[in-house]
Image (tube, rainbow, N blue to C red):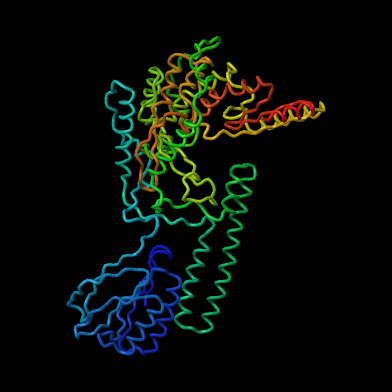
Amino acid sequence: MVGLVWGTKESLAVWLVYRPPSTPAATLSDLLEVVAGWALEFPNLLVLGDFNVHADAAPSSQALALVTSMATLGLSQFVLGPTHQAGHTLDLIFGAGIDVIMLPPVEVPWSDHYALKAKIDFPLLPGSGGEPIWARPRKLMDPDRFRQALRDPVPPGDSLDDLVEDRNNRLLAAIDEIAPKRPLPPRRNRAPWFTEELRKMKRDLRRLERVWRRTRDGASRTSYRTLMEAYEMAMKAAKKSYFAASIASASSHPAQLFRIIRSITSLGGQPNLSTNSTHSCEAFASFFSEKALLLRRDLPANLDTVTELEAPRLTSGPVLDHFDRILPTDVDRFLQVGRPTTCLLDPCPSWLIRERPDVARTPLVEIINLSLDTGTFPGELKEAVVCQLLKKTSLDPLDLSNYRPVSNLPYLGKVIERAVAEQLGRFLEETSALDPFQSSFRPGFGTETALVALTDDIRRQLDRGGSGLLILLDLSAAFDMVDHDLLDHRLADVGIQGIARSWLCSFISGRGQRVALGREMSSRHSLVCGVPQGAILSPMLFNIFMRPLAQIIRSFGLGCHQYADDLHWQYHSLTYYLLDFLKCGL
């Protein structure tokens, strides 16, 4: 007998049986004992082979006992006709959790048995699907070969989009030449703590198990149990050593430390939505795009908003009316900053560009400078690919509102953003255009500065014998709710004019997104408001957009600290003034 398992326990297990004619009848009991163990472990089980029992129209007692016993284990027998030239039914196919459709048998010249043909239908392994997984082999992506495969650029076109399209086509042709996509088997996710020593012990354990099942003697059983106990102890020690080392290495990095602790204590991971037909990528795309529209509908423009939009745009003070052109050395610096993340819309892996900056230097200088000179952002780079992430593993995966959209943008767009972000950030800091108590997305203004300033204000009030009221607010979908017309007006208020403001307006307008789910991609959904998630410039634009809010709050005598979309309002007074303030209904 030979046992095979395809995939996981939830997939398919197969037992191949050959029972010689002279085998004693008692061997059927041993066979049934093994099959019983497999039937409990594997829901989809197939047992087939030459059993050498006469399961004819008038079956023998052995055949009748075998079929009856298999039926009690949940396995049905599917062969109905003769499988031997003498007219006997000696070859049988049993199955549980599997639909077997028998086809006409075929006579073969090398045996007096027929070749049985059947169509077997069983659940596919989750994630493997019916179609192959197409991917580029990582080992073939050599930066030097990639550089040699790049063809010369065609004469530049008349527009920025022509330059971007030619650049992407050249990169795609080069990566297709050195590492074409090919069907690859799905990779098994091995535990990081599972070492080679454990893998060897597991192989030895399986070998001893086979020996014990074959001999059924006490010595082999003792050897098997001894190694089993040693394997379990070694596995626990490997887990402890791995996680202890991971925690120690992240002791000075709180964010990484929290991720490690969360992975250890979490009961389950993210659901595999690619095998769940309950939600489609179109359903996610519609939900994410309509969320901001519904919030905007519930918050219509008031008189103050209309008045602000109709007010003349008068700027006094420094002005940023254009962005300076960049040099090739600037491109090299931009490529080395940040992580080389790759979007599904990118023509090739971004790390290849970072490894060989000479292949991208000249085209990028032309594209970026043309973009800055014309005040336009390439339309091809305004599309994002969105993945969905369950906010907490304890939440219901069937509720779309429990998912957070994670946006991924093309790499070329982020390089262009860095050229603008560097100049825009320098202008905002030199002119002190942002609120002094906005403590996020700014160098030197982190969580520590926000907490120190807030604690200092509270302690000062307590030292004066007064009291304080702290109100904490979190704006819902704040980045997605930024109104483009208001943002344009507030860009002018801080001194951004001319081509610089035209470029920023082009950057936020005309955007869209698609939702990726498994190997499926939704249609494009347009975004009529908000700043793009995952973009380098979005935090700066959000800070500019939120700038008047702190001024309005302070006009009512309240203190205000901001951290991204989190607001801290403070009211300081003597105790009896504070009571009167509370009675007013705030």
Q: Is 96 positioned to the left or the right of 435 in the image?
A: left
Q: Is 270 positioned to the left or the right of 172 in the image?
A: right
Residue 524, image x, y percentages: 35, 36
> At x 53% / y 82%, what residue is drawn?
219
In which quarter of the view is residue 445 placed?
top right
Q: Quadrant of the N terminus?
A: bottom left
Q: Is 41 positioned to the left or the right of 565 in the image?
A: left
Q: Is 287 positioned to the left or the right of 130 in the image?
A: right
Q: Quadrant of the C terminus?
A: top right
Residue 149, image x, y percentages: 31, 37
Q: How many marks?
A: 0
> At x 46% / y 34%, what residue is drawn?
294
Above-or-below relation of 528 to 520: above
Above-or-below relation of 178 to 444: below
In which quarter of the view is residue 130 placed?
bottom left
> At x 29% / y 23%, what residue is drawn?
156
In which quarter of the view is residue 327 placed?
top left
Residue 568, image x, y percentages: 65, 30
Above-or-below relation of 462 to 74: above
In depth, the one of 1 and 364 nearer the eye is: 1
In depth, the one of 160 and 488 nearer the eye is: 488
Above-or-below relation of 476 to 236: above
In depth, the one of 92 and 526 nearer the eye is: 526
Residue 556, image x, y percentages: 67, 21
